[in-house]
Amino acid sequence: MITAYTLLRITLGLNILLHGLVRTPKTRYQAFVAAVQTEFKDTLLPGKLVSVVAQSIPLLESIIGLLILTGFCTGLSILAGFALMILLLTAKSIKQDWYTVSLQMIYMLYYTLLQAGLRYNTFSLDALFFHYRQTCLC
């Protein structure tokens, strides 16, 4: 079970990290922010809010992904991932993009599995530095 947990944590962490990193170069970052603003311009969401959130997504994904990938502050990182997914899921629901919402629910399932299996997080930086205990969030 430790191997399965570790592989799931590493693959989700890598996935989320790369979501953020590929949007980090200036031209891609600007294109991403512009695309999000265009996508949500005809929704109830305020344009300024959409802009601020779009600008923060690549950095948040990069940080959350790196922390989950390495297993550092895993519990808090998973909760941060949940929070980001809830934000994204809410926005896509307001837009009525049900296909994307269904894909986001799969990510939520992965986060749920990782949170439920924290006791198997023994091959991680948490275990190395903090002698990880199941009750520890970080």
Image: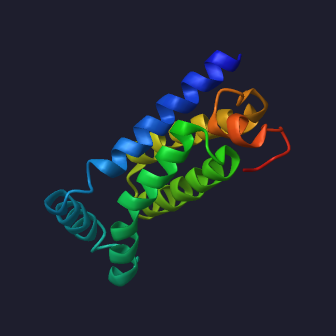
Please provide percent x and percent y for residue 134: 83, 38
Please provide percent x and percent y for residue 122: 72, 28
99 vs 11, left or right, is left
Which of the 4 image quarters holds residue 43? bottom left
Q: Front-most of 133 and 86?
A: 133
Residue at the extreme left: 27
Q: In the image, is residue 25 above or below residue 71?
A: below
Q: Front-most of 100 and 67?
A: 67
15 vs 7, left or right, is left
Which of the 4 image quarters holds residue 32? bottom left
Quadrant for the N terminus, please. top right
Residue beneath the point at 69% across and 19% down: 2
63 vs 27, left or right, is right
All told, the count of numbered labels is 0
Q: In the image, is residue 95 above or below residue 17?
A: below
Residue at the extreme front: 129
Residue beneath the point at 18% across and 57% down: 28
Residue beneath the point at 52% across and 30% down: 10
Q: Front-most of 56 and 127?
A: 127
Q: Front-most of 96 and 32?
A: 32
Q: In the image, is residue 58 above or below residue 115?
A: below
The colour style of the image is: rainbow
Residue beneath the point at 52% across and 57% down: 84
